[in-house]
Each structure stands twice: as C-alpha cells, then as structure tokens.
Amino acid sequence: MYRIFLIIVTAVALALAVGYGVRSSHKTSNAAVTALLPRGTVALVHLPDLQRTRDEWHRSDLYQLYTEPAVQDFLRKPLSRVPSASSLSQKTRELEQLDPKDAFFAVISAENDQPKIVAGFRFGGTAEEAEKIISRWRVKLLGQQKAGAAPETVEYQQHKLQVYRVASTIVCTVYDDHWFFAANNVDELKALLDRADGRATDLQTLLSAEPDFRDTMSNMPPSYAVCLYLQPKVFSEKLAAWRASAGPPVKPDPSSLLHQIRSICATTRFDGAKMHDVFFIGMPEQTGDAELTRNSLSLASADTFLYLASLLNISKQLSLVDPAPGAGYLEVRLQKIGQGLAAAGITAEQWKAAFGSEVGAVADWRQDEHWPAALVAFPVKDFAKAKKMANVLARVLDDDGAWVETDKNGVHYIATPYSAGFFALRPTLAVSERFMVAGLDTASVEQAMGRAGANALNLSSTAGYKRAAHALPDPTHMFTYLDLGLLYTRLDNTLRPMLLMGAAFMPAMNDYVDVSKLPPPEIIAKHLTPIVSSQRYHHNGYLAESIGPVTLSQTGLGALLIGGAGVFGYQHTGLNVLGGSLGWPGLIQPRLAPTPAPRPSPTPSETP
C-alpha cells in the first residue's frame, strides 16, 4: 500500500513538474539579456525565440490567409518576378541550425553622435558549428575582402576578440560558451564579457536595476515574440540641440510632453491565431479625472468599419493659436480653429461647459455606396451653449460658406454646399441634446442622429463587435475598433471594377499581376476579423493594447509602406507602363544619350 501511495505521489509530482516546465517554456524572461547590459542603455530590441515565433506565425490568421489556394494562385505571377527564394530558404535553414535564443541589439550610449552598439544571441551546438554559418553572414556584412582578411586578435580574460576594421568603423566579435557577441567598440565588448562571465559584481550597474526600466517591464506580458525598449531622454536632448542649431535658441520646457516621457516599451506576441501588441509610455496622466464613456457608439451602425472614442484635453487644443514653422496640415487646421474660437471669445472653460471631454469618430460604409461616410462627435452638456458654439465653429471652419440652419426632430442642423474636384459635398454640423456631430454630407449626419435618438440597432449589437470589445481590458482613455473584413469587402466592391478596367487599358500591367485572379472577397474577409485597441492609464504610464489578425499599429505601418510603395511604383514604373501601352516606352525615363539630329525631310519618292 505504501509503495502504491509513493508511486502515485511521484507521478503527480512529475506531472506537475512537466506542466510547470511546459508553461515556463512559453514564458519569456529578459533577465538573461538585461544582465548583460549596463544601466542607462538607450535602446534595446529583444527576440527571445525565433524558432518558436516562426511556429506560432504558421498558426496565425494572416498565414492561413496566405496559404489559401485562391491567394496563392493570385500571388504566383507577382512572386515569379521576385528574385529566387533560394537565398531565403538557405537563411531559414541556417537559423534552424543555429536555433538562436535571446537575440538582442542594444544602443548602450549615444554620446557625441557616436552610438555604442552591442548585440548577441545564444546558439545551439558548438562554437565551431556556429562559426560556419556566422562566417557567411560576416562576408555579406563586411564584404569578401574585409571578411577574408586576417582580423586583429585581442586577448582578454581567456577570450579571443576578433576585430575587423572597415574605414572608420570597427566590428568586433567573440564567442563565450554558447553566446555570440558583437560590438562596434572593443572596450564595450570587454565590459559585456565581464557581465556575461560574472566579473561585474555590482548589480546596481545593470539595466535590470534601473527604476524606469523595471517599472516599464512590469507592464509587459511575460511572453512575447519581440520587445522594443527606448529611453527617450537622449533623443529629446538630441532633438532640442538640433532645434537650437537650426533656429533661434529655445529654452527647454520641462512641462512639454516630450520631456515628461520617462520610458517607452512595445511588445508583440501571438495570442492563438491573433497578434497582440502591448505599448507602454511612462509619463504623467494628461487628462485628469475625465471618464471615457463611449456614448458615441450609439451613432455607429452595423455598416461601421471604424469606431474611435478618445478623451480630449481641450485646453491644450484651444491653446494652439500660434502656428509653428513647418507645422503639418492637421496642426495648422487645429491652430486655425483655436485662433477662430479665441477671436470669438470662446475659452476652454466655456467649451467644457457646453461639451464633454470625449471625442468620437465613426466611419460607415454601406453596401450600396461607393465611398464611406465619416463623422466626428462630441457629447453635449448644455444644448443652448452648444448650439451657439456650433454656429461659431461653422464660420471658423469656412468663413465664406453659405451656411443654412434648419431644425428637424429636435436637432439643429448647419450645412453648406461645397465642391472639391469631382466630389460635391455638403459639410454639416448637427446639435442635439446628446451630441454635436460633424460630417461631410447631410444624409449621413441625419442617419447617425436618427440612430442615436431612436435607440436603433447599432454597432454595439453586432456579434463581431461584442467579441472584439471583450478581448481586452476596458479602456479609460482611448478605444478603437476596426473591422478589416468589412473594410476589405467594401474596397473590393469599389476598386475591383477599376482594376479590371485599368488592366484592359494598360495591357503591360498584366506582366506584373493578373487582376482577373483576384480572390473572391469572402475568402479574404473570413480571415480578417476585427481589430480592437484599448488604452488606459496604468502604473504611472499609458498602456495601450491591440489585438487582431494584425494589430492597429501594424495596420498603420502597413498602410504607410503600401502607400509609399505605390507612390514610388507609380513614379518609376506606372507612367512607363502607361507610356509603353500607348507606344511611348520612355515616357518618364531620363535621356542617357545626346538627342539625335533631326531627320532630313523626306524626298518626294519617300513620301507616302
């Protein structure tokens, strides 16, 4: 009996140990890396386990979309124009052989515009096996001649540092047990070895002992695919120095937003088939005791693909009355609004007496419409004051507009016709007991006000929104919902006929892509579930999380990259494709040879 009991206890203990080990293997501890870096490190990128990240990527929604047969069929032609994928396959095999763990890249100081950089990773196998792969990387980084030349060898604490010099740049590397380290400064590589081998005994000199770093990392998840940490003080000082050298001296303002940021950290991880970002900015709270209610959600319909609610510090917005040199378009428009409201005698306190501290944005796209309708909404606290301010705001936005005021179902509308190229718009402001809504056409504003007044079926009632909204903690400062599937479906409905027509008029386009093989929108949309983002103030900083097939930040970055690539491609290829289809192959190509002399006039016998 005793033996049976002992066997059972042992089996349970082993099961618990295995379970704990499995759970622990999926957690990321950055202790191994932070113990290698000094206090005051400016920037750090940490990739704990590339192989695990690759496996998780293969289970993601985005990868499942990529492997759809219809998508693969569509991508076959454009991918065939990409250089051979053999080099990519070779790099993948090399990474599998190395099995790198805790890969990191860090800027440990940036004094005198000379950043000191260290990097490294843990590898599987022996140093000799790792060197066979790393030597090939070294050739590509330094070039065959420099990498093939005998490096300078520096002996240090039973280690041999290999130092390569390329012009004024130094690249030094070393193996330490199962670690490979590199740096652009010999002394920093020696200090890194001291920390790795335990010769640096003062723990307070390590990055892990820095209060801002510890506070920041306490807000990060225990497991991630990649982590980025920044200490912005150095960058703010560099920016201040640049501004001082570029113009009149500017006295540092400790109360400015940039100077209040103590630290920045961002992580990305896979959460099942979704991607999950966590972004933290250590700084004081900016919006006081205001509460995010998301009341403007009642303005959104089942056809809403974008909904945003955010707290607004109106005191700062109305203070933008002096345009700064080089200000962007949005900043200039905000400054113009601030100037107009100030000229009309409207103060921040008066605005806050009429409106709440929250702003909402809604973008609807009905199936029978070619383009979306966008709205901006403010909660109303005092209808009479809000109505007066809406009149002032309308004139500030367009002082030449023929604004017409009407009342309908308890809502006061202010609208004016406006022409912008091919589009005939009717900008409209509407004020009710609950909201002030601004939109580019009267119909969409009226529909939104109708939904809010009748408690009709809206976005909050849809299954997609309910699932997405509960995927993250409740926001206290900002909330964003983006239905990628709905957006793609509407874009496909509008743009597919244009693309087919473009392919018909520009046959050369077919050399790059077969538009007729565009996958059906339902195949794409089923993998594009909604993205949701939530921001709250937590542990002395703003904590923003985003989850979806891609995250909100990745979507924004992707849109910028695609837009930039589109502009570049249009400038360098698009006009040439158009010119080639019209018989003008050199439409935008510069002339590389002298212009030939004019051909003599044809003789009568040559004239047709």
Image (tube, grey):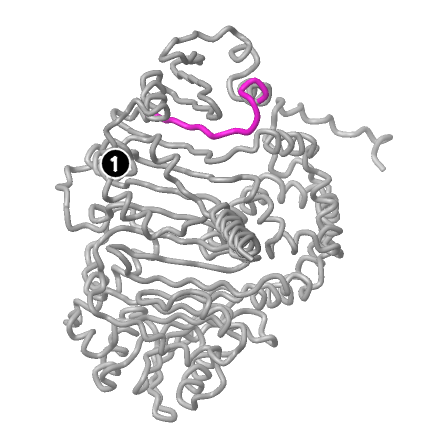
Image point 55% across, 42% down: which residue?
Answer: 568
Identify the residue at horizontal 53%, vertical 20% (top origin): 127
- Asked whether the viewer can see residue 560, the reply is no
Task: Give the residue displayed 64% in from the left and 67% down from the top.
Answer: 493
Residue 344 position within the rendered picture, expressed as x and y whole percent measured from the top left: 17, 71
Give the percent coordinates (x, y) of residue 202. Answer: 23, 29
Foreground residue, 392 or 464? 464
- The residue sitting at the left extreme is 251
- Residue type, label 1: Val
Residue 225 x %, y %: 48, 45
Which quarter of the figure is the N terminus placed in?
A: bottom right
The residue wearing badge 1 is 234
Mark 1 residue crowding within 10 angstroms, few (<14) / some (14–19) / many (20+): some
Q: Is residue 121 above or below residue 526?
A: above
Q: Identify which residue, 501 or 253, lies in the foreground.
A: 253
Answer above or below: position of 397 versus 414.
above
Q: Position of residue 486 (x, y in %)?
A: 57, 68
Residue 120 occupies quadrant: top left
User: At 51% across and 60% down in the image, what residue appears?
Assistant: 548
> Is 494 left or right of 438, judged from the image as shown?
right
Name the foreground residue: 286 vs 398.
286
The foreground one among 235 and 549 is 549
Q: Is 495 included in the stretch rendered in magenta?
A: no
Position of 315 compared to 14: left or right?
left
Q: Looking at the rendering, which quadrant does residue 81 occupy?
A: top right
Q: Which residue range is magenta in the image?
A: 116-129
Say if 333 sits above or below 226 in the image: below
